[in-house]
Image (cartoon, grey):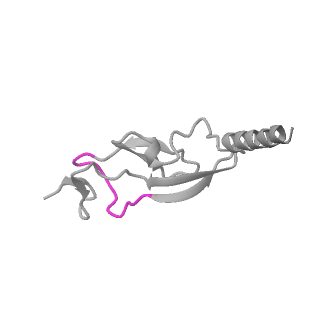
Amino acid sequence: MELYKLMTVVILASLLTCCHTKRNFHIECLDTEDCADTHCCLLGGFRYSIPRCAQLGDVGAICRPSGEPFNTTVSYPDGEGDVNLRNVYWLYCSCQDGLYCDRQSHTCQKEK
């Protein structure tokens, strides 16, 4: 009987942990790893911006030379609580592999 009680507690704790990490239906990504290999998790510059998967910059695309991924916590007025974001980009994704973000033009360019 003790084993049954212990198993019940373990299962309930697992379910509570699992259900607590639910994602708001409108949030497409919590981490760049949630997106395809050719995309990043992008957070816009407006209040209550919703993270979304966006394509990495191609030649000529606007980019941020110092645009490194970062971790942050955001919240929304829907009362669902805080949303923890990891490895997200601000405003623009990084450039595709083989490209770099030019500091003068702020565009993705082919590596020399």
Q: Quadrant of residue 68?
A: bottom left
- In the image as oriented, which residue stretches furthest toward the left? 112
Q: In x, y percent, where is residue 94? A: 34, 53
Q: Quadrant of residue 21?
A: top right
- In the image as oriented, which residue stretches furthest toward the right? 1
Q: Is residue 61 magenta?
A: yes
Q: In x, y percent, where is residue 28? A: 51, 39
Q: What count of labels does the image hold?
A: 0
- In the image as oriented, which residue stretches furthest toward the top? 25
Start and end of the magenta stretch?
Answer: 58-69
Q: Residue at x 24, y 57 (%)?
A: 100
Q: In x, y percent, where is residue 62? A: 30, 51
Residue 22's place in the image compared with 86, above or below, is above
Residue closer to the observer: 30 or 42: 30
Residue 16's place in the image compared with 107, above or below, is above
Q: Residue at x 60, y 53 (%)?
A: 74
Q: In x, y percent, where is residue 25? A: 60, 35
- Taking 94 as reference, is 100 left or right? left
Q: Residue at x 53, y 51 (%)?
A: 46
Q: Where does the N terminus fall, quadrant-wise?
A: top right
Q: Magenta-highlighted stretch: main secondary structure? A: loop
- Taking 68 as reference, is 48 left or right? right
Q: Where does the C terminus fall, quadrant-wise?
A: bottom left
Q: Residue at x 35, y 64 (%)?
A: 66
Q: Is residue 70 magenta?
A: no
Residue closer to the observer: 18 or 11: 11
